[in-house]
Image (cartoon, rainbow, N blue to C red):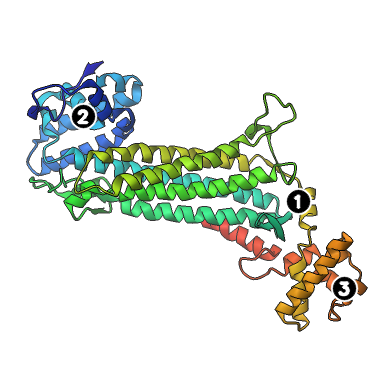
Amino acid sequence: MTKEKNLWGGRFGGEADKTFAEFNRSFRFDHRLLEVDVRASIAHCHGLQVAGVLTAEEANQIQRGLDQILAQAGADSEYFNSIESEDVHSFVETHLVALIGDAGRKLHTGRSRNDQVATDLRLWLRGAIDDLIARVRSTQEALLDLGEANSGVVLPGYTHLQRAQPVQFPHWCLAYFEMFSRDRERLTDTRGRVNVLPLGSAALAGTSYPIDREALARELEFAAISRNSLDAVSDRDFCLEFVGACSLVMVHLSRLAEDIILYTTAEFGFFELSDAVATGSSLMPQKKNPDSMELVRGKAGRVFGHNVSLLTMLKGLPLAYNKDMQEDKEAVFDAFDTTGQCLDVTSLVLRNIDLKEERMSEAASHGHMNATELADYLVRKGMPFREAHETVGRIVMHAIERGVELQELSLGELRSMSALLDADVFEALSLGETLETKAQPGGTSPARVGEALAAARASLLS
């Protein structure tokens, strides 16, 4: 491996200490920006040509050289090891000069690594956001497929991890669908602020050359150019927004993972994961562990950590660029990698879940989960809700003492608590009626859930 000449070495008479030089290098992780660095460099080359800094022949030489670098990087896995580079920008420039000679030395005219890296990172993030949006959508599709395939299944809904009221299983799926819809909206919104071109801001004060920044923005498909050169090179809000959006995706994935982990336990027994997404124990032959979901739950903390590290890194920085900001890339790259992988694994798990319908229905029918329906029944008969709530509380205590469900009490026992209770109360207490009454928009009645599934499916096509 040969060592490149530093792009900034003219001011220095001595060599950098090897320990510091290695500490200073970012090429081991920012080499993944090579494609966007070449793309941005080609656009900058065109801008220099129009500005009269480069001749047509020089511009053609530079573009051919950059295309060759990109092709070589794609074809040879060892290409990145050919030069001991400080960063991806110096790697590209060193190879370009080696390929085409002095014309390559002109490419950096009017440009700093400060606006160059900001441009590269925004270009890369645009693609990363589009990729994550597609993967969130795939997870939503898996949820919808699971819900639609089990449209008649009921399970207990919980508050405080205590059985509360029965809900349709697709309603549970749709709850997570809504969370991921907000994630897609957030990522899309973030993309809008990412899509601003900093190129042309140079180191911090702007460029002295008559480069048409609007033309650069059009070529690189940016929606706008930055309005302030100081801000353009020192802004990493867009990185923080992206990692923040990833953090919320991971919150939702972790909550879903926790539900799945709980529901696969023997104590719940609602789900079983297929062998494709579970593991066993090296000691206990009977075990089937939901490691896939436990890893998703665990990796959430990793992404949250990147969010905190970026906040901490940025909070005390003076204008404009500071080397602290090199820390942005590892946080952004790993947040993207981890979130994307967790979305993929979650989609796979959702397609490998076996529902234990009988166990779910039994659980949804026990635990006095129709107590609210009984209170609502009394309200419809004219009793104030607070009185109805207290009356039903006494009935529940009586049922607990008897060891029965509310619908298993006799009419005489019920009427001893309130004369408003008639024979039709048993229909009101049935599981089917409990679900049917939740017929307002957003509720868990079969009709509303069917409409919600159709609307959710349509939203993925828009």
Residue drawn 43% across the image and 55% down it = 186
- Could you say which disc has been placed on residue 414 in the image? 3
For mark 1, give the secondary structure.
helix
Query: In this rendering, would 181 be left or right of 42?
Result: right
Q: CA distance from mark 2 to mark 3?
A: 83 Å
Q: Which amino acid, by three-letter code, is at mark 3? A: Leu
Quickly name the residue at label 1: 360
**Res 276 → quadrant:** top right
Q: Are marks 1 and 3 in contact (CB under 8 Å)?
A: no
Disc 1 or 2, which lies upstream in sequence? Answer: 2
Query: Between tags 2 and 3, which lies in front?
Result: 3
Quickly name the residue at label 2: 90
Query: In this rendering, would 261 be left or right of 242?
Result: right
In the image, 50 versus 23, the foreground residue is: 23
For mark 3, give the secondary structure.
helix
Q: Which amino acid, by three-letter code, is at mark 2? A: Ser
Residue drawn 14% across the image and 35% down it = 108
Query: In this rendering, would 310 be left or right of 279?
Result: left
Q: Is residue 245 visible?
A: yes
Q: Which amino acid, by three-letter code, is at mark 1? A: Met
Q: Position of residue 354 (x, y in %)?
A: 71, 42
Disc 2 or 3, which lies upstream in sequence? Answer: 2
Q: Position of residue 119 (x, y in %)?
A: 25, 43
Query: Within 10 Å of the Cα at label 1, are there few (<14), some (14-19), or many (20+) other Cα atoms?
Result: many
Q: CA distance from mark 1 to mark 3?
A: 28 Å
Q: Are marks 2 and 3 in contact (CB under 8 Å)?
A: no
Q: Position of residue 315 (x, y in %)?
A: 29, 49
In the image, 396 versus 288, the foreground residue is: 396
Task: Please say if 199 is above or below 93.
Answer: below
Residue drawn 27% across the image and 19% down it = 82
Query: Within 10 Å of the Cα at label 2, are there few (<14), some (14-19), or many (20+) other Cα atoms?
Result: some
